[in-house]
Image (cartoon, grey):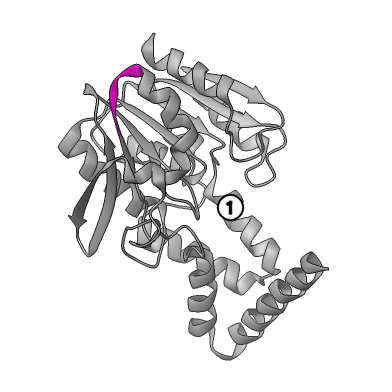
Amino acid sequence: MEKSIQFVVVKSVGFYINTLSYIAPKKAFALAYKLFSQPRKGRITEHKIPKTLLKAEHVSHKHNDHEFQTYIWKGNEEIILLIHGWESNASRWKKLLTHLKKTSKTIIAIDGPAHGKSSGKEFNVPTYAEFIDVVVQKYNPKIAIGHSIGGNAIAYFQAHYNHNFEKIVLLGAPSDFKVILNNYIKMLSLNKRIHQSLIDYTKKRFNLTIDDFSASKFLKNSTIEGIVAHDVQDTVVLFEEGKKISKAWEKAQFIETKGLGHSMHDAYLYQTIVDFIQK
């Protein structure tokens, strides 16, 4: 019953945007983009900080109009960088942290734009990559691990900034922005006017065509060692997206899992990642 109500609400919103696109196209686009880019969960308040993050050192950074939060678990001089996904925050790494601490390396996790304790209302991959660059310039991490769209942000960063990680791990990461956008269009049943306006805006703002906004293209022919892990039962980011990245990225090992869903939480997988980092 709840799913049926949610379906009706989502389709009703889509119908409203479609109708508005003929009357007030700019307002229709603004609403469509807002719903697409503004996360509805993943925030952290000062009164409800997850226990995992309480154990870390909290360091905030200013970048342009943003102030974003990082969390540091101190170890040796070698650094691992953790990049979470959509509607999440740095606390999502709780289970992996237990394993990573065995490496004795310093671990840094970022709250993405409009997530956790970071500022902003809009999330997008290029801004996330800017956050990554600020941290890279200050701490020079050699290993990056990203979940979901966080993995896409790492791939984007690798292609657009002058820094080479030594190893990268992508967990349940999407490859093509086009697929993400098409899924959003399909979910709301948005018309071609809105679809095209979102495509045009992406190209104008980020100087990338929708076809080139792709992790598989960003990492194509990369000489960095990596792991691409994806679950066959992932209903959020389809399994084919992970296969697409690994096919383009010859230096990456592909790990197929079953039963982990999109979260990818698994002790054996995490130990495999630790072994990869330490080899």
| Magenta-drawn stretch, dominant element (helix, strand or loop) | strand
Identify the residue at image location x=62%, y=40%: 262
**Which residue is the extreme one toward the left?**
138
Identify the residue at image location x=53%, y=26%: 228
Query: Which region is colored magenta?
Result: 103-107
Q: What secondary structure is found at the residue carrying circle 1?
A: helix
Q: Magenta segment: does it hold 137?
A: no
Which corner quadrant of the image does residue 43 belong to?
bottom left
Identify the residue at image location x=24%, y=59%: 67
Q: Position of residue 142 (x, y in %)?
A: 28, 25
Quadrant into which the C terminus falls: top left
Residue bearing mark 1: 180
**Which residue is the extreme one toward the right?**
1
Residue 236 as seen in the image, left or right of residue 36: right
Q: Position of residue 107 (x, y in %)?
A: 31, 31
Looking at this view, is 69 or 203 the one in front?
Answer: 69
Looking at this view, is 274 or 74 the one in front?
Answer: 74
Residue 250 is at least partly visible in this image = no
Residue 78 as seen in the image, left or right of residue 273: left
Which corner quadrant of the image does residue 76 belong to?
top left
Residue 186 as seen in the image, left or right of residue 214: right
Q: Position of residue 70 (x, y in %)?
A: 28, 46
Looking at this view, is 129 or 275 the one in front?
Answer: 275
- Residue type (three-letter) at the residue carrying disc 1: Ile
Location of residue 244 with respect to 113 vertically, above or below:
above
